[in-house]
Image (cartoon, helix red, strand yellow):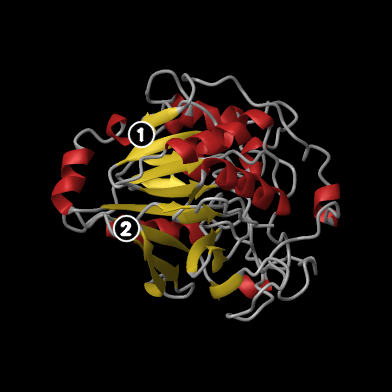
């Protein structure tokens, strides 16, 4: 089935060359889903400030990364294959090939940007959409929840399925895994910091409402984690709802822009990279948060869900309200991103799948500084 002919009626909002959607004007799709309201957060599994060391899942990764001089990992979101699993299968197949690279070059883990399982993240759907899909992917999988992971169904509470894999007291083999064994994870909370060699990953849970919503406790936590992040490591902020997006279905989120803006101004620390999904395509967007230095915002929501969202602005387009610039974009293929971090750079390789042959090709490559980016005295930034 050709992606362009899939049954999907795009919403013509926001208009061309706008990177954020109009606030307070939900789409008809949103209005049709009564459950898309802020959902209460489950109790944390760990203690604040909810930090999880990569060594827990990968003993010895610190020494291995130090020997290689870098850390490599996969990332993408919106993977749940509810209609046609061939798209996800093609993506995972290429990711598996990356795991065959020599030590130091192969990705150490997969950081999922949310919407692991569609459409309500139900526990019983995890075998087909997660365990079976990643059966041959021999590396740990971390995640932040997406809105579909958290949207409750008639017989399950919000995040029941996600928590059954990602937030268990003791890693174990869940019976639903069947013939695709993968031990569960013990992440400390639905939002948490992953402490890695060369890198700190701050993962947010943006809840269910369109454009996302953070409670006060998570907002304060974000500012504190940015403030306390080691200055000798890069910082990546991950959130399911993008701050900027030049698409025709969701657009970027002014609410998420305001949340990160407040956290940066409070902490004085600027992320080296912001990763998001939710919009089903790939976009690399830059914003000069500080003068003369671009901060990259990636939308990587083309991980396997069958519907693709259109990009409505040409590469190079600049939103006159936010000054966000669309650098690179593709809305006709599924794929994933491979991130490499060392002491100097945060680099990326974006792989797209040929939907006919299943072969992969590099669509985008980028390099940004891994050095700490800190606001100057009296400097205030604005994102939304």
Q: Which of 335 and 4 is in front in this view?
A: 335
**Quadrant in which the C terminus appears:** bottom right
**Other-residue count near label 1 (Cα within 10 Å), few / some / many at <14 / 14–19 / ≥20:** some
Q: What residue is rendered at 50% in x and 63% in y?
A: 296
Q: What residue is rendered at 77% in x and 67% in y?
A: 14
How many numbered marks appear? 2
Q: Which of the two discs, 1 and 2, sits closer to the camera?
A: 2
Q: In which quarter of the image is residue 11?
A: bottom right
Q: Quadrant of residue 138?
A: top left
Residue 111 image position (x, y, % from top left) = 43, 46
Residue 150 visible within the image: yes
Left or right position of 216 against 35: left
Q: Quadrant of residue 161?
A: top right
At mark 2, the secondary structure is: strand
Q: Residue 235 carries which label?
A: none
Q: How much space separates mark 1 and mark 2, taking CA atoms?
A: 28 Å
Residue 123 visible within the image: no
Left or right position of 267 against 56: right
Q: Which of 13 and 384 is in front in this view?
A: 384
Q: Residue 340 carries which label?
A: 2
Q: Name the residue under label 1.
A: 181
Q: Which of 115 and 205 is in front in this view?
A: 205
In primary-sequence order, the first of circles 1 and 2 is 1
Residue 139 image position (x, y, % from top left) = 31, 43
Residue 306 image position (x, y, % from top left) = 60, 60
Q: Are marks 1 and 2 in contact (CB under 8 Å)?
A: no
Residue 274 drawn above or below residue 152: below
Residue 214 image position (x, y, % from top left) = 67, 37
Q: What residue is rendered at 21% in x and 39% in y?
A: 62
Residue 61 drawn above or below residue 380: above
């Amino acid at each position: 089935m050709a992606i362009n002919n899939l049954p999907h009626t795009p919403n013509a909002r926001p208009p061309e060359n706008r990177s954020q959607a109009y606030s307070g004007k939900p789409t008809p799709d949103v209005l049709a889903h009564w459950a898309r309201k802020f959902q209460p957060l489950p109790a944390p599994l760990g203690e604040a400030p909810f930090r999880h060391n990569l060594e827990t899942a990968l003993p010895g990764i610190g020494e291995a990364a130090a020997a290689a001089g870098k850390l490599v990992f996969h990332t993408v979101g919106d993977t749940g294959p509810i209609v046609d699993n061939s798209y996800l299968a093609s993506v995972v197949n290429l990711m598996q090939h990356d795991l065959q690279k020599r030590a130091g070059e192969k990705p150490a883990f997969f950081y999922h940007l949310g919407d692991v399982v569609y459409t309500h993240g139900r526990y019983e759907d995890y075998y087909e959409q997660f365990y079976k899909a990643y059966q041959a992917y021999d590396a740990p999988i971390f995640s932040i929840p997406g809105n579909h992971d958290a949207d409750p169904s008639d017989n399950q509470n919000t995040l029941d399925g996600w928590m059954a894999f990602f937030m268990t007291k003791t890693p174990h083999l869940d019976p639903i895994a069947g013939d695709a064994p993968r031990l569960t994870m013990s992440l400390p909370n639905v939002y948490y910091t992953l402490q890695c060699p060369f890198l700190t990953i701050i993962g947010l849970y943006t809840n269910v409402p369109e454009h996302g919503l953070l409670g006060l406790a998570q907002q304060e936590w974000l500012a504190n984690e940015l403030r306390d992040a080691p200055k000798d490591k890069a910082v990546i902020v991950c959130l399911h709802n993008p701050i900027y997006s030049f698409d025709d279905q969701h657009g970027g989120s002014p609410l998420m822009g305001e949340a990160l803006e407040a956290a940066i101004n409070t902490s004085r620390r600027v992320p080296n990279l912001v990763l998001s999904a939710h919009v089903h395509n790939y976009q690399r967007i830059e914003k000069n948060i500080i003068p003369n230095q671009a901060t990259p915002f990636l939308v990587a929501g083309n991980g396997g869900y069958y519907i693709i969202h259109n990009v409505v602005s040409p590469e190079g387009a600049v939103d006159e309200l936010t000054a966000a610039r669309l650098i690179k974009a593709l809305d006709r293929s599924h794929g994933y991103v491979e991130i490499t971090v060392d002491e100097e750079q945060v680099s990326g390789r974006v792989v797209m799948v040929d939907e006919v042959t299943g072969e992969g090709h590099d669509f985008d490559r980028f390099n940004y500084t891994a050095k700490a980016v800190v606001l100057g005295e009296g400097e205030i930034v604005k994102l939304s």
